[in-house]
Image (cartoon, coloured by chain):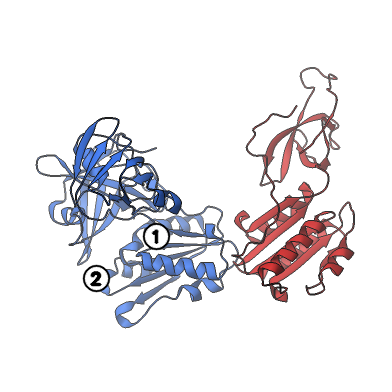
Chain colours: A blue, B red
């Protein structure tokens, strides 16, 4: 199990490609030139960014897009988000070739089902990233698949040309040209044993799940990349009951980040509300839940929270930490 | 004598209609007919008391080792499509496989019968056609006999009712372990008197 307590992997940025005006791809190699662990398609790493003083300023998860069996380097693609919390801007503006970063070992919360007979991959925009590695894997294993790739315009379509050249099964939908993918049409005649995977905005995930449900697909055949970037919100205070500490959470940081900033090391892995590692008991306070992990009942009871993405609705929460 | 708490031992629940499915395929053996009748009634109730469309329900039945309740299935649901009846499990599975090969992702398979029958049908649907176990429900009916595979000669006895039993393939006295292979659909039978040949404990009835 990978948590923030475990040693990270030191890497050097050996290449940066501007794949579209808003997307850069970073090539990472181990600082000592030793091979990086192989992974499975759909895995992500958490990148730790440090400011000029060496203080950790951002930790963001990014899908690995390089071939999973190639340990010489990893590649991640980062879309610049000017309204975000600053991690992607840091990657775009402050990280150059030759710079050093720390990454976690790969973790896969979006794996391909190994028993599936066919895979339908549905991506929107930067959501293409996990599928780049998965398509390598599927090609190698010789399992049939098809890709449906929705984007707004050329800027929003990283790797479109490379995919078009390499993937005969890919369909492209450019919304600025009035083209939209139709989940019902895509899923309707799929044979038994098919699994579908979606990575993109919540609206697309909901549309695909709704279509699958309507056609009677068993829920376990429908997969979505669930992790989300922590939202910004109002500042509040976290009281750590067991360690008797009070920590301020600024509007632009998550509880997890604020605790780490204060020197604590809570268990965590995906940092995106999907893996369940950071589940924490809430002793007092109302929670604004943003995760995909806790059940609706637990969320309503406010008895637990995922500190990587969820925030307090009250000015103060007491956690069992 | 069996070791409690072995996780691979399957737990069978009753069949219940999966409202998420669009096409319901029922397969039964011998006394499994009663479970299928009950399920078919519940499917109709879930459909406002109407029998679901003919294309949405299909029923495959074999008497197996008996009793033959095919007549009850045929009479019990005049509004339903007639069951397809087969002399044996092999015939049933080959017809079922052909039928499922033409179905889509909305199919749900419900199986009722002896443990050997359940897993024979699962192998047809899962390995033959690609239905995942997420879309299959099973209810074990009839006496608690188990399919057991001798780990020494690989002979499977489809209906073992005691531990210890004698392997029909190699004649060894086998202890029935609760370890179950979902892929093969069998429990493991292991020689019970390897250390002290001839020292064979009294067979005990398997009760579950
Ligand atoms: S770290 Fe994965 S859910 Fe919070």
Residue at image mark 2: A155
Q: Is residue B109 above or below residue A297?
A: below
Q: Quadrant of residue B42?
A: bottom right
Residue at image mark 1: A131
Please report whichever mark, 2 or 1, sits nearer to the chain's N-terminal start. 1
Q: x and y percent of residue A191 in the render?
A: 59, 67
**Residue A36 in view (yes/no):** no
- Which secondary structure, mark 1? helix
Q: x and y percent of residue B95 in the render?
A: 77, 65
Closer-to-camera residue (A127/A295): A295
Using a 10 Å C-alpha cutoff, classify the residue at mark 2 as few (fewer than 14 neighbours), some (14 to 19) or many (20 or more).
some
Using a 10 Å C-alpha cutoff, classify the residue at mark 1 as few (fewer than 14 neighbours), some (14 to 19) or many (20 or more).
many
Q: Quadrant of residue A25?
A: bottom left
Q: Is residue A252 above or below residue B170?
A: below
Q: Are marks 2 and 1 on the same chain?
A: yes
Taking the image as shown, residue A117 lies to the left or right of residue B144, namely left
Q: Quadrant of residue B207?
A: top right
- Which secondary structure, mark 2? helix
Q: x and y percent of residue A141 in the render?
A: 50, 55
**Residue A52 in view (yes/no):** yes
Closer-to-camera residue (B114/A114): B114
Q: Which mark is residue A22?
A: none
Residue lying farthest top? B196
- Chain on which label 2 sits: A
């Amino acid at each position: 199990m990978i948590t923030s307590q475990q040693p990270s992997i030191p890497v050097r940025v050996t290449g940066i490609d501007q794949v579209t005006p808003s997307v850069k791809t970073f090539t990472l190699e181990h600082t000592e030139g030793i091979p990086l662990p192989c992974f499975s398609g759909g895995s992500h790493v958490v990148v730790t960014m440090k400011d000029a003083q060496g203080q950790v300023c951002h930790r963001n998860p990014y899908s690995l897009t390089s071939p999973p069996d190639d340990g010489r380097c990893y590649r991640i693609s980062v879309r610049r988000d000017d309204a975000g919390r600053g991690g992607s801007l840091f990657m775009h503006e402050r990280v150059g070739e030759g710079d050093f970063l720390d990454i976690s070992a790969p973790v896969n919360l979006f794996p391909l089902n190994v028993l599936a007979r066919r895979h339908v991959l549905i991506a929107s925009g930067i959501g293409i990233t996990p599928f780049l590695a998965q398509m390598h894997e599927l090609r190698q294993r010789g399992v049939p698949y098809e890709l449906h790739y929705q984007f707004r315009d050329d800027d929003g379509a990283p790797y479109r040309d490379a995919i078009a050249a390499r993937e005969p099964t890919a369909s492209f939908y450019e919304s600025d040209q009035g083209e939209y993918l139709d989940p019902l049409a895509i899923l309707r005649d799929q044979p038994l044993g098919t699994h579908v995977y979606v990575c993109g905005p919540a609206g697309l995930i909901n549309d695909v799940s709704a279509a699958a449900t309507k056609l009677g697909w068993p829920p376990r055949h429908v997969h979505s990349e669930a992790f989300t970037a922590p939202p910004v919100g109002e500042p509040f205070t976290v009281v750590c009951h067991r360690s008797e500490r009070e920590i301020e959470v600024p509007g632009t940081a998550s509880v997890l980040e604020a605790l780490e900033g204060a020197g604590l090391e809570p268990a965590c892995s995906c940092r995106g509300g999907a893996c369940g590692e950071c589940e924490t008991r809430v002793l007092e306070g109302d929670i604004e839940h943003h995760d995909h992990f806790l059940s609706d009942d637990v969320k309503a009871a406010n008895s637990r929270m995922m500190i990587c993405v969820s925030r307090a609705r009250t000015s103060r929460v007491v956690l069992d930490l | 004598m069996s070791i409690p708490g072995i996780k691979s031992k399957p737990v069978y629940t009753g069949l219940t209609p999966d409202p998420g499915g669009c096409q319901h395929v029922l397969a039964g053996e011998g006394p499994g007919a009663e479970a299928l009748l009950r399920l078919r009634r519940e499917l109709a109730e879930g459909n406002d008391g109407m029998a679901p469309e003919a294309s949405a329900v299909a029923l495959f039945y074999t008497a197996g080792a008996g009793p033959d309740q095919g007549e009850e299935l045929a009479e019990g649901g005049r509004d339903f499509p007639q069951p397809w009846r087969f002399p044996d499990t092999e015939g049933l599975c080959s017809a079922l496989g052909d039928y499922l090969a033409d179905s889509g992702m909305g199919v749900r398979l419900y199986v009722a019968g002896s443990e050997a029958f359940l897993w024979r049908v699962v192998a047809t649907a899962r390995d033959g056609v690609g239905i995942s176990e997420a879309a299959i429900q099973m209810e074990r009916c009839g006496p608690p006999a188990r399919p057991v595979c001798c780990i020494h000669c690989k002979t499977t006895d489809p209906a073992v009712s005691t531990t210890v039993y004698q392997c029909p393939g190699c004649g060894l006295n086998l202890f029935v372990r609760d370890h179950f292979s979902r892929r093969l659909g069998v429990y493991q039978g292991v020689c019970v008197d390897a250390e002290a040949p001839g020292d064979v404990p009294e067979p005990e009835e398997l009760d579950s």
